[in-house]
Image: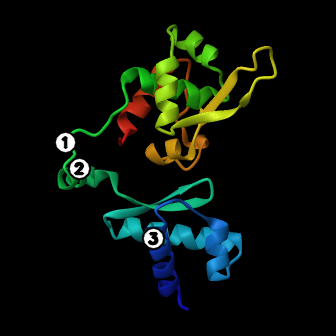
Amino acid sequence: MDEREMMAVVESILFVSGDPVDAKEIGLLLNMDIRTVRTFMKKLIDCFHFERRGLQINMVNDTYQLATRPEYSSYIEKYIGQEHSQKLSQASLETLAIIAYRQPITKVDIENVRGVKCDYIVSTLVNRQLIHEIGRMPTPGRPILYGTTDLFLRNFGLASLDELPPLENDESEATVFFSENEKK
């Protein structure tokens, strides 16, 4: 099988999967070692970008997923009849920024930074699968520790947490990043 055919196979697999596909699975499918898969997928991602297709391949934590390009979201919303997509509130974005930069973090620590209760917001972020419980503190009461999810990374166009913009001393910079990059 030549490279073009392998690209078509992977594109098809990503399309029918809908969910992220692990690099190891792609390697097994194409008889490639993990390093070759990563190089191959980088080339496929570059092809999608170069051709300015309506789809793109997102890479998050060594998984790959086919997605629509954010710049065409208004046309997609118009087609499927969504006039208003569900955006996160400013308070939710602030909370998400705190969690992203300080994870693992407890609800009490989030409230100490924000200065207000955040039960509802944390619950909403968990329900939207942007954050999840990553453990518990080994202290009395064993408070839940929260962290971001791969869906968070995909929604904000990040391959890993290392791509978060650096902060000086103010979380408001992080909130601006999340506000500008929020898709839904």
Expressed as whole percent of the image width and height from the top left, the position of residue 11 reads 46, 74
**Rendered residue at 55%/92% (across/down):** 1
Position of residue 134 in the picture relative to residue 181 (left or right): right
Q: Which of marks 1 and 2 is nearer the N terminus?
A: 2
Q: Return the mark for residue 98.
A: none
Expressed as whole percent of the image width and height from the top left, the position of residue 34 reads 69, 70
Q: Which amino acid does label 1 sit on?
A: Glu
**Rendered residue at 59%/10% (across/down):** 112
The one nearer the camera, 147 or 180, is 147
The residue that disc 1 covers is: 83
Expressed as whole percent of the image width and height from the top left, the position of residue 31 reads 67, 82
Q: Return the mark for residue 77.
A: 2
Q: How crowded is mark 3: few (under 14 residues within 10 Å), some or many (20 or more)?
A: few
Q: What residue type is labelled 2?
A: Glu
Helix, strand or loop at label 3? It is helix
Expressed as whole percent of the image width and height from the top left, the position of residue 156 reads 45, 43
Relative to 135, does residue 90 appear above or below in the rendering? above
The residue that disc 3 covers is: 16
Q: Which amino acid does label 3 sit on?
A: Val
